[in-house]
């Protein structure tokens, strides 16, 4: 759980690395940060080499001073464990800590996030350091959370990992026979007779390149194993903190749709979810919202921490575009609208050296409180201080769930067909962005989570149907739910083995169709179909399907090619509910029209109807309902309020009817 008992307002601050500059500057840092209403700092993210100069010596003197400094200045602390980058001496002495990359090269010392998760050295010394930190700082009440390592990720193909993989497989499959069946090793004569014949699937073994593999089953299991191995590193350190501080709130900073780690598994272990929001220059607001909603979804709907965002530029993008005036504030409130209960930055002061010296910071190289970015940070700090507790702890209520699953993501993109242009997130985003663009609250849930709270469940490209997922969907529809899925669904079970007997496999009865063939269209090529009187493009993949109880609800099927006339959009009445199938991919106008119709039929209302580019999202709790309205446009927009509403930010009450919101401006309307 997020440590609500230790906060009185939205914690506001972020990464502070004073060990990177001289002490003369520290008091000035504190003055400037306090003046900007900063009240939380994340400390000690990359200090392992300083804290442990050699195998037997630990030196906490500088961290002690930093803790004194920030505590004296009334700051709360998110205490990191520093294990995101190992010391050079350790790599020299114990090369097992160095990762082996996908090409089979053992890395040398360098970079960060660079330790092998199955290295005995890493396991021993990361936990030892974490325990020492917990012991040393356990009496500081202002430490409100512990931050394990930093942005866990990547992968390793070393011999320790390979050995651990075999153990993981043995636990999962029990017998080599079962493993042979799961991986379909009769193909290309891969039958294994002993666990020690199995090697890690990399460029030296099963792979043509990162995504193309001879054996999807092996590569998938390696991904699962690697996600578990790295999660074990988190769990070990978390346990070390809790040995000393059983009630500590422990987390780590996740990265949104980060493919290598199955965050649904991760969130189960974390006390609360935290994540770093660094959109690309061309991400629209609905794409950013999608990441926030995933981060809320993995935690089962619980609020999360916005652990990092840049106050201005992100230095590692192809070009460092400035966040325009008002955008940092707007995106901070957007995070809150989707479930964030902190607003935090990377970083407090710009370093003068190395690869992040041009990354945005609250205090820039000039050190001036007159800089635009600083003034914007301070202004938002003042607003958050005035908001106090009012926004904390509230939950999003949604009648719509989008199913997302890492296994499915991995499976689709390892799949060896039907199209190299089929990207799991692109297909997912078509549905999410259409719904969010119309201001429907959306929950993102894993297929093994409960569905009964929802009226509409959408599973874009539900390629891999695992275990009893189909039973859960079947029960949901039978009980009156509306289910939507698309082409390339129900094809395989959890080992990526095709479910024989016709596509879409275990979803076939629910959908009332048989998909006989699937045609992949080259980029730019289009077929067409008509839905409710309008013609839409059919792109990417076109299923050739037969009705088995479902009805065709497009008008006249595909417009051209040898399968002209075959159904594109189908609906199957099933129990008390209905299941829709979309046999192809289309454009935004189609997804909006289709989903808006389903929502209207099911009585699902958008949070508020607004002009394009004005987002509305809501959260609810004991203090009532908060309606966030965010104008992402460069121009003012007019919204229409159904009744008078008080805005928590300005304190003003707006009468029912039309009123204008300035570009990038925000309202948080409180409703009883
Ligand atoms: C990540 C890291 C930070 C910093 C920022 C820069 O989120 O966690 O340490 O490198 O990126 O964008
Ligand atoms: Zn390894």
Image (spheres, grey):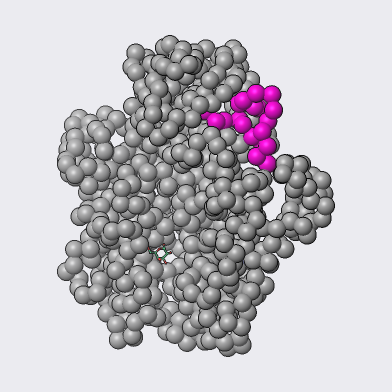
Quadrant where the C terminus lies? top left
Q: Where in the figure is residue 394, as x and y percent of width and height?
A: 43, 46
Answer above or below: position of 145 versus 465. Answer: below
The residue positioned 47% from the left and 32% from the top of the image is: 400
Q: Where in the figure is residue 663, as x and y percent of width and height?
A: 19, 45
Q: Where in the figure is residue 76, as x and y percent of width and height?
A: 41, 69
- 143 vs 186, nearest the viewer: 186
**Residue 644 image-quadrant placement:** top left
Q: Where in the figure is residue 481, as x and y percent of width and height?
A: 54, 24
The residue positioned 82% from the left and 55% from the top of the image is: 194
Answer above or below: position of 49 versus 646. Answer: below
Give the total of numbered labels. 0
Relative to 193, 663 lies left or right: left
Answer above or below: position of 396 versus 598. Answer: below
The magenta stretch is: 479-507
The residue positioned 36% from the left and 22% from the top of the image is: 536
**Chief secondary structure of the magenta span?**
loop
- 332 vs 409, nearest the viewer: 409
Residue 312 falls inside the magenta stretch: no
Relative to 626, 141 lies left or right: right
């Amino acid at each position: 759980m997020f440590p609500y008992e230790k906060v009185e307002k939205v914690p506001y601050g972020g990464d502070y690395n004073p060990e990177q500059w001289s002490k003369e500057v520290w008091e000035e840092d504190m003055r400037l940060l306090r003046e900007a209403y900063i009240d939380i700092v994340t400390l000690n993210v990359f200090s392992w080499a300083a804290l442990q100069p050699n195998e037997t010596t630990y030196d906490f003197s500088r961290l002690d001073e930093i803790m004194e400094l920030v505590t004296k200045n009334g700051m709360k602390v998110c205490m990191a464990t520093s294990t995101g980058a190992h010391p050079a001496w350790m790599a020299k002495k114990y090369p097992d800590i160095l990762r082996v990359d996908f090409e089979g090269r053992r890395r040398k010392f360098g970079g960060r996030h660079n330790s092998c998760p199955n290295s005995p050295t890493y396991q021993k010394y990361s936990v030892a350091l974490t325990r020492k930190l917990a012991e040393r700082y356990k009496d500081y009440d202002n430490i409100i959370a512990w931050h394990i390592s930093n942005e866990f990720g990547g992968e390793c193909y070393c011999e320790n990992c390979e050995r651990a993989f075999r153990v993981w497989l043995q636990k999962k499959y029990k017998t080599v026979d079962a493993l042979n069946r799961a991986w379909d090793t009769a193909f290309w004569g891969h039958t294994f007779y002993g666990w020690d014949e199995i090697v890690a699937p990399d460029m030296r073994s099963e792979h043509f390149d990162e995504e193309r593999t001879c054996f999807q089953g092996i590569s998938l299991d390696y991904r699962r194993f690697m996600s578990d191995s790295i999660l074990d590193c988190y769990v070990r350190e978390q346990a070390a903190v809790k040995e000393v501080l059983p009630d500590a709130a422990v987390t780590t900073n996740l990265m949104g749709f980060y493919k290598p780690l199955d965050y649904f598994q991760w969130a189960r272990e974390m006390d609360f979810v935290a994540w770093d929001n660094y959109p690309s220059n061309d991400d629209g607001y609905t794409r950013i919202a999608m990441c926030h909603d995933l981060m809320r979804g993995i935690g089962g709907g619980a609020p999360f921490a916005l652990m990092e965002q840049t106050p201005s530029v992100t230095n590692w993008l192809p070009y460092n575009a400035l966040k325009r005036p008002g955008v940092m504030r707007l995106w901070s409130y957007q995070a809150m609208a989707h479930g964030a209960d902190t607003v935090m930055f990377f970083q407090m002061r710009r370093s003068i050296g190395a690869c992040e010296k041009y990354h945005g910071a609250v205090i820039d190289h000039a050190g001036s409180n007159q800089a635009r970015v600083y003034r914007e940070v301070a202004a938002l700090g003042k607003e958050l201080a005035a908001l106090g507790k009012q926004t904390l702890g509230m939950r999003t209520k949604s009648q719509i769930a989008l199913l997302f699953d890492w296994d499915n993501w991995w499976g689709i993109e390892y799949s060896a067909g039907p199209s190299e242009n089929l990207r799991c997130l692109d297909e997912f985003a078509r549905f999410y962005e259409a719904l969010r663009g119309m201001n429907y609250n959306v929950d993102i849930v894993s297929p093994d989570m409960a569905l009964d709270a929802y009226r509409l469940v959408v599973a874009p490209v539900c390629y891999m149907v695992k275990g009893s997922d189909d039973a859960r969907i079947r029960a949901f529809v039978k009980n009156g739910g509306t289910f939507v899925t698309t082409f390339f669904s129900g094809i395989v079970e959890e080992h990526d083995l095709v479910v024989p007997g016709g596509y879409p496999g275990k979803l076939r009865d629910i959908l009332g169709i048989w998909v006989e063939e699937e045609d992949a269209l080259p980029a730019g090529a289009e077929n067409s179909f008509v839905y409710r009187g309008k013609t839409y493009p059919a792109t990417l993949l076109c299923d050739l399907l037969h009705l088995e109880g479902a009805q065709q609800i497009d008008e006249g099927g595909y417009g051209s090619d040898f399968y002209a006339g075959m159904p594109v959009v189908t609906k199957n009445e099933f129990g008390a509910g209905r299941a829709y199938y979309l046999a192809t991919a289309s454009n935004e106008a189609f997804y909006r029209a289709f989903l808006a119709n389903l929502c209207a039929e099911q009585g699902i209302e958008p949070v508020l109807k607004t002009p394009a580019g004005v987002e509305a999202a809501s959260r609810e709790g004991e203090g009532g309902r908060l309606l966030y309205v965010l104008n992402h446009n460069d121009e003012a927009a007019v919204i229409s309020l159904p009744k008078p509403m008080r805005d928590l930010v300005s304190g003003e009450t707006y009468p029912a009817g039309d009123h204008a919101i300035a570009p990038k401006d925000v309202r948080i309307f409180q409703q009883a």
